[in-house]
Image (cartoon, rainbow, N blue to C red):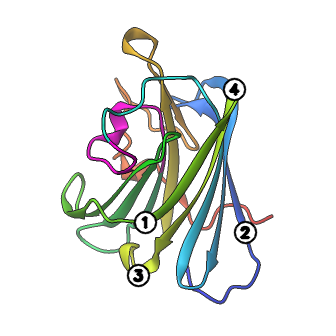
Amino acid sequence: MKDGEGEQRWQVTLERDWAGDRACTPVCLTLWMEGGNLRIEVDAPFFNDPAPPLAAGATDQLWNYEVVELFLANLEVDPPRYTEIELGPHGHHLVLCLEGVRCPVSAMHPIAWSASIAGDRWRGTAEIPVRWLPSTITHFNAYAIHGQGEERVYLAAFPVPGEAPDFHRLQHFAVWPPEAR
């Protein structure tokens, strides 16, 4: 992904669970480059899960709460490099840079993230500096998580089959870029 690609925007829709079965109301992400940043707009159903017990901002282990996640990867290098971006409806976020599966090299990066809840939906806009992304993006996936305990639901743009949800199954990521709109 390079800056200067004009107004090209990419749309990512999550409407299936992690195993590929049809799920609930879709989650939509819109992505584009602007001013040296990746911009992400989130439009998602709000399930009213409890917020993390911390002030809004960078939050470790945000995946334990209601969240939307975007993974951007370069799978043509060894070890693979990827960035995990997590965005929550209450203003919490987490950006992890990884080299190798589940091997973070940096985390808790501050980003511009604002979210608002209106009824049964939440929306937000993030700006992620390109320095925290792989220099070349070859693959991606996106996820959404909500619910508590046995009612926990895991959505995926592209299925990551297995015995349980595992969003680090990089071999199931789709080729970048997503469909332009």
Which residue occupies the foreground of this view, 72 or 158?
A: 72
Identify residue for label 3: 135
Note whether residue 14 is visible: no
Residue furthest out toward the front: 55
Seen at 71% across and 27% down, the residue is 119
Whether residue 10 is visible to the viewer of this picture, yes or no, is yes
Residue 164 in the image: above or below residue 117:
above
- As measured in the structure, the alpha-carbon distance from the residue carrying label 2 to the one carrying label 3 is 19 Å
Q: Give the amino acid at mark 4.
A: Asp
Rounded to the nearest angstrom, the CA distance separating label 4 from label 2 is 26 Å
Residue 9: mark: 2
Give the foreground label among 1 and 3: 1
Residue 137 % position (x, y): 47, 73
Magenta residues (range):
55-69
- Answer with mark 2 or mark 3, whichever residue precedes in sequence: 2
SS assignment at label 2: loop
Rendered image: mark on residue 126 = none
**Rendered location of residue 19, percent (x, y):** 50, 28
Kindly identify the amino acid type of the residue bearing the numbered disc 2.
Arg
Q: Residues within 10 Å of mark 1 (few under 14, many from 20)?
A: some
Numbered label attached to residue 120: 4
Residue 142 lies within the magenta run: no
